[in-house]
Image (spheres, rainbow, N blue to C red):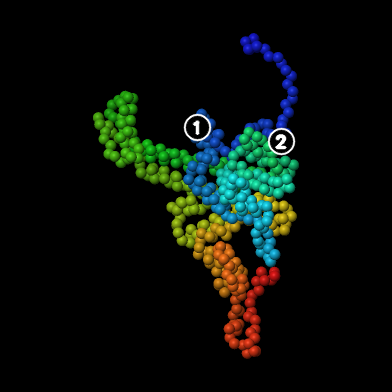
Amino acid sequence: MFERILGSRAKVAEAPRAEPVVSAPLVQDSRPVNLQSSASVEEWQEFFGFLGNDVVTRESAMKLTAVFGCVSLLAGTIGTMPVRVIRKGENGGSEEFADHDANWLVRHEPHEMYAPEVFFEGAGVLAFLDGNGYAEIQRNPRGRPIGLRPFFEGTIKPFERKGRIAYRVTENGDTYGRDQDDILHFRGSATMNGLEALSPLKCFGRSIGIGLEADEYARRFYKQGINPPGYISYDGKVSEQVADEVRNYWQRKFGGVQNSHIPAVLAEGGKFTSLMTDPETAQLFQSRSFQVLDVARAYGVPPHLIGETEKSTSWGTGINAQTTQFYILGLRKHVKRFEAELGRKLLTREERLQGVAIKFNLDTLLRADLAARYDAHKIAVGGTQHPGWMTVNETRELEGLPKLDDAEADKLFRPVAKGAKDTTDPADDDGAQPPAPYFQTTREEAQ
């Protein structure tokens, strides 16, 4: 019938379809899902409304202040720490490998569009929200890294191929593959399959959703809040028209924050019955406070660092101990993951065997604590009458101060042994002084 109405069409033998050849195989039984960007999901949800309101996306999760605070703290701290390529120094210790190609990328300019702070903070935000942050390593014909391009948008899917990890990249409508040596994969949490890290939005997205619902409830409570809320009753039967008029009058006169606490007047024998008590209002605030603690617990961030100090002291040694524990147990594991990934992908095996590494300078976190920093310098130069392991000029260089033109400022402090003769006393052997005993340091032993 359809052929009679629409006309018949000559049947043409179809040639077998040739799939495009890419380095990453296409998945036939599933459609790629954009894990990096949730804009399309929110647009469809807003237009059709068929997904409900319980979908937690990257953008919606950041609307919860607890998530925004934890992610900003972790990613911002990593992004603001100096990064450099180091190698073993000639006289022991370590020094900056300033001539290395990767040193320019991680310390000065990873990409022509981004500073190092923006690059690492952005990669951290993706890692702590989606669980995985990605960047492409751009190389010259000789294979040396010349740029790091972050994937802020697009879909990246890792898979195993011939004993190695490959990545299927989909962006701007194009799909292509990349080898593991050409992709920086920053993981924000543990992994259970060896390929991708667990996504916080999937692991505790329900908790984040409850927090968002509590915020929405509080917003409507204060926007529409009739204080106290309840119902209006009349003796006898009330028509729907009269009920709407009374309801609209009540909302117009007493609804909203600007009309709160205004005395209500009911005519014609109306009676108002309250349905909410003060304890129920308190439970609303307690539930919101619990969500802050729940999110902070999931991210391993002390609550006081995101402004929740209700159940902990906000000053003194207790807070200092919690902050120190956060640096040791909470932040260090993320920093080590970033360092390991940068070292594996930007350095050769021979360089790593020779002691070349990429390090974040965790010591810069002490710069905000002036007293702790100066106490550390005091111990380093031997101010506690112990052997010094840094010279005065070395500590001045750490503070950005010029070196002193004094030979003593380049010498390590050596304490005089207890009971030794004071070297300032006059000598009996024609002015010759016996050498004062001192403790030989590791640095001097290596020279």
Q: Residue at x 59, y 87 (%)?
A: 426
Residue at mark 1: 46
Q: Residue at x 65, y 44 (%)?
A: 136
Where's residue 83, x and y in %? Answer: 61, 55
In the depicted structure, whether residue 68 falls above or below residue 86: above
Residue at mark 2: 22
Badge 2 density bin: few <14, some 14–19, many ≥20, Cα 10 Å: few
> Which quarter of the figure has residue 252?
top left
> Which quarter of the figure has residue 183?
top right
Where's residue 103, x and y in %? Answer: 65, 54
Closer to the camera in the image, 212 or 151: 151
In the depicted structure, whether residue 160 falls above or below residue 417: above
Q: What is the C-alpha distance between the residues marked 1 and 2?
A: 35 Å
Helix, strand or loop under label 1: helix
Closer to the camera in the image, 197 or 40: 40
Q: Quadrant of the N terminus?
A: top right
Closer to the camera in the image, 215 or 119: 119
Helix, strand or loop under label 2: loop
Q: Residue at x 65, y 86 (%)?
A: 432
Query: Is residue 337 visible to us here?
Result: no
Badge 1 density bin: few <14, some 14–19, many ≥20, Cα 10 Å: few
Residue sitting at the far front = 405
Where's residue 358, x and y in %? Answer: 65, 55
Residue type of the residue flagged with mark 1: Glu
